[in-house]
Image (cartoon, rainbow, N blue to C red):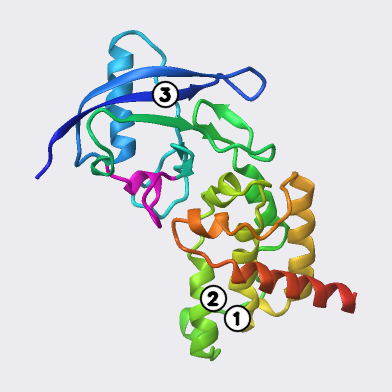
Amino acid sequence: MSKSINLTLKVWRQKNSKTKGQFETYAANGIDTDCSFLEMLDVVNERLTVEGKDPIAFDHDCREGICGMCGAVVNGQAHGPQRKTTLCQLHMRQFSDGDTIVIEPYRSRALPVLKDLAVDRSAFDRIIQSGGYVSVKTGQAPDAHAILVGKEYADLAMDAAQCIGCAACVASCPNASAMLFVSAKISHLALLPQGNPERETRVQEMVAQMDKEGFGNCSNEYECEAACPKGISVSNIARMNREFLSASRKK
């Protein structure tokens, strides 16, 4: 049974990446506990608009936990306190009446703030463009299915393919590393026969682009796996390192 709660929000407000930001405090009263976190922000924004104030900017799209657009740091945790949950699927019943909630954007030099809670994730797009694709022509669907894939590899590839590119791994890593994201994209294709033609060039080019974007390195903190809403395993990072070492030796 739903109920209403009253909250205090401390929200990071910043006009763009070149201006200084600061926390501003808002009262969020009468919030239905069946609301999602983003719906709660919608309610607050409606009230700010009525008051003639600038609404809080935040990323969102599908609001079904599959697009990777939403994301913010809630009380120090990317996507909030519930494990394996995106911000849009986090419900206000996870909070209590009278709570103070601190909301801020992902912090990384490679993910500059666009406005308030919205960050620029185009660095991820450039990493994918550098090699996260296959050139093999599979023809129609039946032709693609004619290539047999062992169940173990198919399962591992599917696990890696679940990555939605939300950047929670970057936000949670003390080094702002993108290695969980990049390794998931590399593993997904390296584990499948369709990914073999570009296997060696892919890992080298994607890792090079990741470094070029200014992301940090992995120091085995495991914070990325804990924050990932899809539960992507850090074992993919080990696989990426093996792929990179093998490709470098052959080169």
- Spot occupied by residue 182 in the image (x, y as percentages of width and height): 65, 60
Q: Quadrant of residue 6?
A: top left
Q: Is residue 37 left or right of residue 212?
A: left
Q: Which residue sits at x=12%, y=36%?
A: 3
Q: Earlier in the sequence, mark 3 or mark 2?
A: 3
- The number of callouts visible is 3
Image: magenta residue range: 79-91
**Residue under label 3:** 10
**Residue under label 1:** 192
Kindly check if marks 1 and 2 are in contact, taking CB atoms under 8 A apart as contact: yes
> Is 104 situated above or below 231?
above
Nearest to the eye among marks 1 and 3: give it.
Answer: 3
Q: Which residue sits at x=70%, y=70%?
A: 240
Nearest to the eye among marks 3 and 2: give it.
Answer: 3
Q: Quadrant of the C terminus?
A: bottom right
Which of 8 and 150 lies nearest the eye of the viewer?
8
